[in-house]
Image: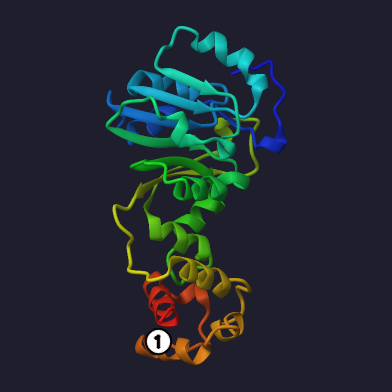
Amino acid sequence: MKLNFHFKKRLGQNFLIDNNIVNNIINKANIDEKTLVIEIGTGAGALTNKLVEKAKYVISYEIDTELKDILEPMFKDIDNLKIIYDDFLGRDIIKDIGDYKYNRMMIIGNLPYYITTPIINKIIEDKIPITEMIIMVQKEVAERLIAKPGVKDYNSLSIFIDYYFEVDKLFSVSRHVFIPKPKVDSVVIRLRKRNKAKINVNNERLFFKLVKDAFVFKRKNLRNNLKHYNIDLIESVLKKYNMNSTIRAEDISIDIFAAIANELSK
């Protein structure tokens, strides 16, 4: 693929050029004629081209208005596609989808490293009614999103994602199938929205603050990271799981964090 286009590093622009990867994403998505797909990052339209063949509607967000000259001629005869040249993070998505009729909505996108977490946060906080997301992210980000307790990549983001989504790694993607070529490989993951929270939490704000604080200095133990909390109460909960406050956050499951938060919220 050759484009008369100046790639912008600040926007994390790396366009997928391998149709096999595109087809693999489409196959994993199980899109049908009743699906509304929100695509984050139209790019050069490689994935968009396939999405419009499968979905009832596609709303694609592209922050770079310079791509309009490439995309508009390509899709001028496609009537189930709307490209919005704006920042997804700044949009009122509920308003954007307001006039569409569909049975299922999902999000697909190749997300630059620096906006992966903000996008997931927005989807949750704005209560965008998706059933799932299929996103391509840098390998190191994927490892954090799917990490389980006891591994080095497990962190507060792992717990945040696990609370709201079931996460699966679908397949790896080589850095060599993009232009320009990024420095790292990528991974395609699926995040299925949970119908209800995985665990019972009495106070979500306290729960997420506790988790974030527990990981603030990753090499320190809970007693050090949570010294501003009631550490005796935390100890009493940990004791039930044969643990104590000298343990590090990376070895504690979401269920135990929930138990601690629930005890602190009483």
Image: 242 above or below 102:
below
Q: Residue at x 38, y 32 (%)?
A: 24
Q: Position of residue 49 (x, y in %)?
A: 45, 19
Q: Position of residue 265 (x, y in %)?
A: 43, 78
User: Is 19 placed left or right of 5 in the picture?
Assistant: left
The secondary element bearing badge 1 is classed as helix
Q: Is 251 in front, or is 227?
A: 227
To which quarter of the image does residue 111 belong?
top right
To which quarter of the image does residue 8 belong?
top right
In the rendered image, which quarter contains the N terminus?
Answer: top right
**Disc 1 designates what residue?**
237
Q: Residue at x 60, y 85 (%)?
A: 227
Q: Position of residue 7 (x, y in %)?
A: 70, 27
Judge whether residue 21 can be spotted in this image: no
Q: Residue at x 36, y 29 (%)?
A: 36
User: Is 22 placed left or right of 10 in the picture?
Assistant: left
Image: 194 above or below 200:
above
